[in-house]
Amino acid sequence: MSAMRDAAKRPAPAAAGKGVGLSAALASFDARIPFARAVPYGLQHVLAMFVANLAPIAIVCSAAGFDGAQTAMLIQNAMVVAAIGTLVQLFGPWRVGARLPIVMGVSFTFVTVLCGIAAQYGYGAVVGAVIAGGVIEGLLGLFAQYWRRFIKPVVSGVVVTSIGFSLLSVGATSFAGGAGAPDLASPQNLFLGTVSLIACLAFQSLAKGTLKQLAVLFGLAVGYVVALVMGRVDFSVFEGVGVVSLPAILPVAPEFQVGAIVSVVLLYLVSAAETMGDTSAVTSVGFGREATEREYQGAVAADGFTSALSGVFGCTPLTSFAQNIGLISMTRVVNRTAIAAGAGALLLAGLVPVIGAVFSSLPHAVLGGCTIMMFGSIIVAGFQMIANAGFTQRNVTIAATSLAIGIGFTQVSDIFMVFPEAVRTVFMGNSVALAFVVAVVMANVLPRNMQVQGALVASGADEGREGPGSEGASDEDGEAGGGAKAPDVACSVGEGGARTCEARDPVAR
């Protein structure tokens, strides 16, 4: 019966045939359109996520001490697994996959922790933790209806914010030339990083419409050309590169370290929370409705199982890409054939090793100049998610405390010396995992009728939302009693400190 109810909530497929125009077909998930006409719209999705999909692999490979050829091979594999993950989300075999226009790519969530694991245990432990954790998340996804309510929207916002902060040092190190570089912070590296960053900013400021999605790609291209002129590009990675090459299976033998697995499993829970938020966002902006339980379960299960497959290919975990949801909100293109065409383009790119070689030959400073802006954008996205959850005193308390503990404690490693080694392995230096645990506990323990006071929290409308015992009142999730969706509250401070608040429609994350 539950499956029948979920199926009833799905939008009816658009009628196929000559009576349906291309625009209407692109706005329908199931409408049939010629593959050739779908390709440009699929390529648009690939360009929006291409750099973000490959950058995490390049960063972790650098921490693992891989040479250019090894990095190029794993970048090639990353394109293949991203294509597979996207196709699983689109077509959803059995209960795995949301059957929604969700684009999958390599996640930034795991970068900081996996860099630490690679440095401490070796890359084999990275592969083992990715495979084991992916299977665990996939199994949890199949039963998401039993635990989804514990991951509140404010928790997701805290997690995304802490991810952004944890990546800032990674981006800054890359900007200066990369970890272990003999010329770290040299004038040449700083110049290349600055040129790439300025190119990204200029393109994003001047470009129109969906072209803004290509700002990072433009910055990389400009930085690469400048690096060529300066003689800073390593061409050794192109030696012996063939025209076509199949991806390598288990290029690094997995090693299963308990501490590494526990640490990564916590981040898989974080990734699951992100994926649920993205699933809700894509159904909201793409179809104007709430996601069904089947879609939540399928999305998280696909997130886990395809991440385990990514480990088999030697890559780091996958996740749904929010920038592609932003592209859907601008273009309204949700057609399965169009997104599948993009996945096909990624798959073909993964079979052409020269693409991976070009990316791996990028100087770290060029990559850092572009990615540091991306990492800052992650922090802002987290702030927006916290705002969308509602600036109640309860939510502000949860966000403030969890971020302070998660980011602050991990900067003072001596705090963890009194704990057992297993705890130190998971949390010492892992601000995302610590902030996630604190936020989850507080979100499910703090009383829901905390009074709303102070200059940083919404008053008036929010007090009504959290009033205990009131019919139709809603909690911090923004879910009104009786199933109605409560409005978000936007507040602003004007000149002279005057503060105004107004209700608004929920904004998709």
Image (cartoon, rainbow, N blue to C red):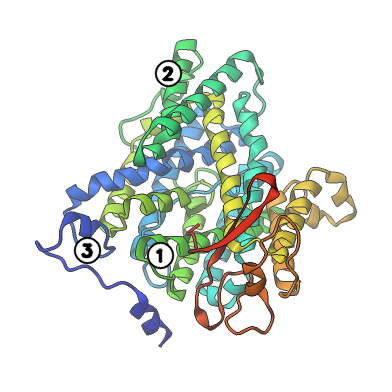
Please tell me whether mark 3 sits on a helix, a strand or a loop: loop
Residue at image location 75% in from the left, 46% down from the top = 429
Drawn side of residue 367 relative to residue 40, left or right: right
Q: Amino acid at mark 3?
A: Ala
* Crowd band around label 2 with a 10 angstrom C-alpha radius: few (<14), some (14–19), many (20+): some
Residue at image location 18% in from the left, 57% down from the top = 33
Position of the N terminus by quadrant: bottom left
| Residue at the spot of label 1 | 283
- Determine the residue located farthest toward the top in the rendered image: 230
Q: Which mark is residue 31?
A: 3
Q: Which mark is residue 97?
A: none
Q: Is residue 199 visible?
A: yes
Q: Amino acid at mark 1?
A: Thr
N-terminal-most mark, 3 or 2: 3
- C-alpha distance separating marks 3 and 2: 42 Å
| Residue at the spot of label 2 | 225
N-terminal-most mark, 2 or 1: 2
Q: Picture coordinates of residue 335 (x, y %)?
A: 28, 58
Q: Amino acid at mark 2?
A: Val
Please tell me whether mark 2 sits on a helix, a strand or a loop: helix
- C-alpha distance separating marks 1 and 3: 17 Å
Q: In front of the other: label 1 or label 3?
A: 1
Q: Picture coordinates of residue 389 (x, y %)?
A: 60, 63
Residue at image location 52% in from the left, 31% down from the top = 370
